[in-house]
Image (tube, helix red, strand yellow):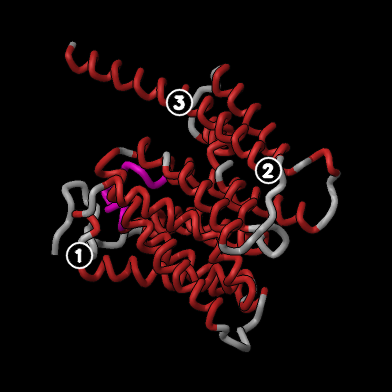
Amino acid sequence: MSRTAVGVPTIFGISRVPWQIRFVMLGCIWGMSFLLIKVGDEGFAPVQVSLGRMVFGTMILLLVLLTQGVKLPKGGLVWFHVAIAAILLNSLPYSLFAYGELHTTSVLAGIFNATVPLFTVPIALLMLPNERLSGQRLTGLIIGFIGVLVVLGIWRGAAGGELVGDLLCLGAAASYALGFPYTRKYLTGRSDSMFGLVAAQLMSGTLELAIVAPFLSGVPTTLPVKSLGSILLLGTLGTGIAYVLQFGLIRDVGATAASTVAYLILLIAVAAGILVLHEPLAWYQPLGAVVVILGIVRSQGMMLDMQRLRMVKLLVQRRQ
């Protein structure tokens, strides 16, 4: 049983694949997830789609635990924080995207997923005392949210089912954004294996959805092959293997470089929706997506500068 030096397990020989290929694989897997959600919605209720992907994803993570000796965290308090993280990062956003795609396209769902960093900045400012709002970050936020309004085509009016779907997808992005600083505040820096924490998170999210699903949708009466296959891929790849790829990339190239996969996810989601599902794309939607990305780049640029400054100060202090 092999494990990496930083506690990230290996599985199926993935760690031996060059990181550039794994980067593209992760972007394609997560980018295709919005298409798979759309197809899953055709045969199952949205909460069933979310529960199915969690079940299959959890099975992959449990396989890693059993074969590689990774241990689950211990203690009631840590499991409480894990359960909250599961709501914010799994069960709630997965369900919001699934419900949202009943009313909007997978293309727009992928675009709105790219807004997560915009929501993360103000939430982190509120939750993490060491975060500061600079002029550059504020400018980036303003630019980014102008881009969101362009994607929404706000000048067309605020009515219709498509707007409901768009807002649900934005709600999913906001949930992710709340989950990241929550996890950073309460779960990072622990002695527990981070991969074990993620496995516990998926287990908690699966249980959460299993509890609420019968009240929201009942039990499926049919099992359409195409939709079931989509959920199987969504879970095993998008919620299972993707975590293994993500941890490996963070280990090999760092969290900052690994996070840039979000831009590839956006491109794949848009291309898949248009080419495979033949979904429409209005002229202002890709324009708004570009504005969103510009806002994210500007707001995150200052964040990276602050991180480098902290590292330099730390090195100077150590030398002194």
Residue 141 appears at what percent x and percent y? 61, 29
Residue 229 position (above or below residue 192): below
Q: Amino acid at mark 3?
A: Met
The reply, left or right, for residue 244 in relation to residue 271 is: left
Vertically, is 208 above or below 137?
Answer: below
Question: Does 312 appear in magenta?
Answer: no
Q: Secondary structure at mark 1?
A: helix
Q: Nearer the viewer, mark 2 or mark 3?
A: 2
C-alpha distance separating marks 2 and 1: 44 Å
Q: Which residue in the structure is indicated by mark 2?
A: 285
Tell which tag, 2 or 1, sits nearer the viewer.
2
Membership of 188 in magenta stretch: yes
Chain part drawn in magenta: 186-195
Residue 13 locus on image (x, y percent): 20, 61
Q: Amino acid at mark 2?
A: Gln
Task: Bin the neighbour count of mark 2 within 10 Å (Cα to Cα): few under 14, some 14-19, many 20 and up.
Answer: many
Along the viewing direction, whichever of 117 and 70 lies nearer the viewer: 117
* Numbered badge on residue 303: 3
Tag of residue 277: none
In the image, 263 versus 95, the foreground residue is 263
- Can you identify the residue that label 1 sits on? 68
Q: Residue at x 57, y 51 (%)?
A: 270
